Image (cartoon, rainbow, N blue to C red):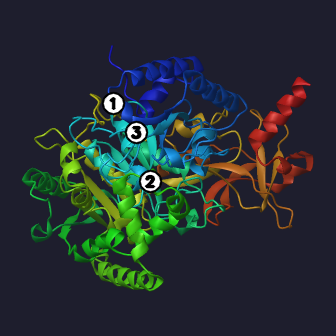
Amino acid sequence: MQFPSLDLHTLETLYAGSTDAAADFLVNLLKRIDTYPDPAVWITRLSTDDVIEQLRQAEQCRAAGLAQPLFGIPFAVKDNIDVANYPTTAACPDFAYTPSQSATVVQRLIAAGAILIGKTNMDQFATGLVGVRSPYGACRNAFNPDFISGGSSSGSAVAVAAGLVSFSLGTDTAGSGRVPAALNNIIGLKPTRGLISTTGVVPACRSLDCVSIFALTCHDANQILSIAAAHDRTDPYSIHASALSAAPTPPLNRFRVGVLPPAQEEFFGNQDARDLYRKSIDHLNQLVASVIEIDYTPFRDAAKLLYQGPWVAERLSAIRPFLDRNPDALLPITRSIIETGRNFSAVDAFRGQYHLQSLIQSAAAQWEKIDLLMLPTVGTTYRIADIERDPLQLNSNLGYYTNFVNLMDLCALAVPAGFLPSGIPVGVSFIAKSGHDHLLINIGEAFHRLFNALGATVHKLPNSPTPCPQSDWIKLAVVGAHLSGQPLNHQLTDRRAHLVRAGRTAPLYRLYALEGTNPPKPGLIRTNSTDGASIELEVWELPPAAFANFVAAIPPPLGIGTIRLDDGSDVKGFLCEPYVIQNARDISHLGGWRQFLCVRGADDAG
């Protein structure tokens, strides 16, 4: 019997809301993982009992009315990301510690019902793009074990490509969330810096680090991002959603996409990879308004700064006390790279910043002509034996098209784009300016469908009932009976609505339990006083026609107005006419409708 695809839509359909179905699937998945031939994918695996206990807790949350949009969805995290009560090693056993609290992003995913399967192998201290720099073994390519998987998020990428988890978290400083995605035929999303909190993540270059997402489809990556992204006051580099571009996504046939001119292509002697990129440009011409050759020089020169400039000193800063105490704990190749950080002074750091800023200014002239870049994710790939003979230069080659992205504060999406004669995929990356993440998903989805393959599995892309939202879709905040799992949520999903994210209002509102409504509903009212509360909500997105149809059916005293969110942005949402609060119960102190339902249920039981 063929094992099902692990994309989100397939599993949601398979489970059909049943905890028993989810439990049966997860138990069989763990057996499948046990038989996977490369144990170097994992550093720490959770037991079957621990996995089923997570599912039980998710079911309890769902029964209490809490949103579980990822109910029963299996995932993995790179082992430089904290998970409470499990060791974090960063692929260095002597560095290992056991945190009492999970990283913020892990907390958000588990709170949404996702089920953690384990922690994955990686290039030590996230220093490498090859996937072989680990004392836990070289994590091998999902298509051919003689080839590298790519790093540093090697295990996280292979776990998705091999059909062992639905999605995984990596980190991306130099390209670690994109290179292994390309080499394993999956989606690799590196969002704008600060969009996902890095609290609880072992830093590599803290000012550049991003948590990245590996998934089987662009739709899945976007869904995970909508849950994982949130402002986090404990992360000094965290940004508010209001920092993102509010411009609508144009139709694909209006996109202007930059590509490499033939004279600036670098494929390190791999003509087959060059041919795949030129074919990708041909495909691109079928999708977008214009394909424009750009000058890659400022991007190329910025890429060189990451390991040839003072940012190596930031890698040293991240682990210097440990390295000074335990120099022999690091692999020789990792230690040699990080130790070069001692060669840079504070003056060098400022000079590097000045040089980078001049390159960003030069690149701005290219961005005036285009909306996106489409570059090879990697120029070539290598066998593990090749990397063992020349570990530095070949690793550097893999970052030729990725190293500049975080330095220039850009966002990127790696997408499958075909296979080399060796059977190894290489892919392309779409790259956009900071805050323009919304431009990546739709073009990535359209491009991916030209190739229609999910990792190293036999499965094809599903026809998801909730496609990536289009530019004219309308966001709607809900606070009561339309929340996920609540009795009127179907009025959204029946209209193809898409859950964007959970969140809260600004502390400007009062929430009331309305009398005589069936099913029970709350009323949200903005207050002019200083005693406003922050109320739990969800933001959904609907097509314009569906939004109009939905609004027309709303009964009084409810209506649609403008709601201020806690990040300062505004969105349309449910508000209530003030006259009804005379006989309504003020439940603002509870923080949300689900909390009220839990309290009311406890009172009824008592």
Q: Residue lying furthest top in this view?
A: 1
The amino acid type, in three-letter code, at marker 1 is: Asp
The answer to whether residue 127 is above or below residue 261 is above
**Distance between mark 3 and mark 1 Cα atoms:** 11 Å
Residue depicted at x 86% and y 29%: 602
Q: Which residue is mark 3?
A: 136
Q: Which badge, 3 or 1, comes first in the chain's sequence?
A: 1
Q: Which badge, 1 or 2, comes first in the chain's sequence?
A: 1
- 210 or 315: nearer the viewer: 315
Is label 1 in a helix, a strand or a loop?
loop
Q: Which residue is mark 2?
A: 328
39 relative to 515 in the view: left or right? left
Q: Which residue is mark 1?
A: 38
Q: Which badge, 3 or 2, comes first in the chain's sequence?
A: 3
287 relative to 561 in the view: left or right? left
Circle on res. 406: none
From the image, state whether disc 1 or disc 2 is nearer to you: 2
**Residue 594 appears at what percent x and percent y?**
74, 39
The amino acid type, in three-letter code, at marker 3 is: Tyr
From the image, state whether disc 3 or disc 2 is nearer to you: 2
* Mark 2 surroundings within 10 Å by alpha-carbon count, few (fewer than 14), some (14 through 19), many (20 or more): few
CB atoms of marks 3 and 1 within 8 Å = no
Residue depicted at x 35% and y 52%: 442
**Residue 585 appears at what percent x and percent y?**
89, 45
User: Quarter of the image containing the C terminus?
Assistant: top right
Report which quarter residue 175 is drawn in: bottom left
Is label 3 in a helix, a strand or a loop?
loop
Residue depicted at x 22% and y 41%: 147
193 relative to 102 in the view: left or right? left
**Residue 304 appears at what percent x and percent y?**
29, 71
The amino acid type, in three-letter code, at marker 2 is: Asp
Task: Decide if residue 548 is in sight here.
Answer: no
